[in-house]
Image (cartoon, rainbow, N blue to C red):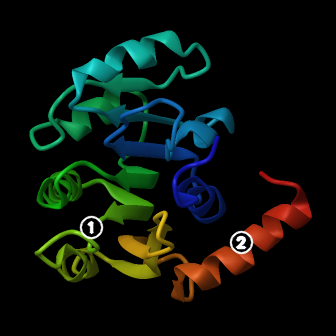
Amino acid sequence: MISQAHQDLFALTTAKNKTYIEIGAFDPIKWSNTYRLEMNDWKGFGIEFVTDMKHAWDQISERKNKVYFENALTFNYINAIEENNLGTHIGYLSCDIEPPQNTFAALKRVIEQGITFDCITFEHDKYQSEVDFDSEVRKYLSKFGYKVAVEDVYFITGKKLKNYFETWFVNEDIEFLPESFDQWKFHKLKNVKRNKGI
């Protein structure tokens, strides 16, 4: 199973350390940004507000990393890092809750607790949001030493429309030339096919 727009592949090929925080864990398998990471021995934890999903997580034996069924906007990320024996520099942050203003608030909370990341995927839902959270998040993260890596990340509807919904970032310490989603897919997916996956 892969994530909706290959966010897991972005993390696998970009992050220097095999740890993650997933804000908006939702389903343990379907479109999960961290399922494939955990299957590749990554450590980390997720946060999910919808307690109805707890049963699905309890039923999936191959997922051992912890999921907290709590509010990402008030969550104590430092305590969870200590509980899960992780450092304050994490490989990958997945930020995807609803609506996008909550996603932005959750991003601010984790960043302002002093946690840093190699790479971040942020869901801004530009295709349906009246507020340009994409621009807001770019400005915000640039102040903390992050740069845009992949922009115009989209999914395609049945009408073959591109719905732009995410931007991906990397820590400025990581060498990464910015690309459009189409450029990134062309290079990365070709390499994956050549190497028969990760």
Q: Residue at x 27, y 67 (%)?
A: 124
N-term-proximal mark, 1 vs 2: 1
Q: Which residue is mark 2?
A: 188
Numbered disc total: 2
Position of residue 165 relative to residue 1, above or below, is: below
Of the residues shown, which amino acid type is indicated by label 1? His
Q: Is residue 139 left or right of residue 38?
A: left
* Label 2: how many Cα within 10 Å (few below 14, some 14–19, many 20+): some
- Residue 24 percent coordinates (x, y): 31, 42
Q: Nearer the viewer, residue 83 or 160?
A: 160
Residue 77 visible in image:
yes
Asked whether the beta carbons under mark 1 and mark 2 sit within 8 Å of each other, the answer is no
- Which residue is disc 1 drawn over? 124
Front disc: 1 or 2? 1
Dot 2 falls on a residue whose secondary structure is helix
Amino acid at the residue labelled 2 = Lys
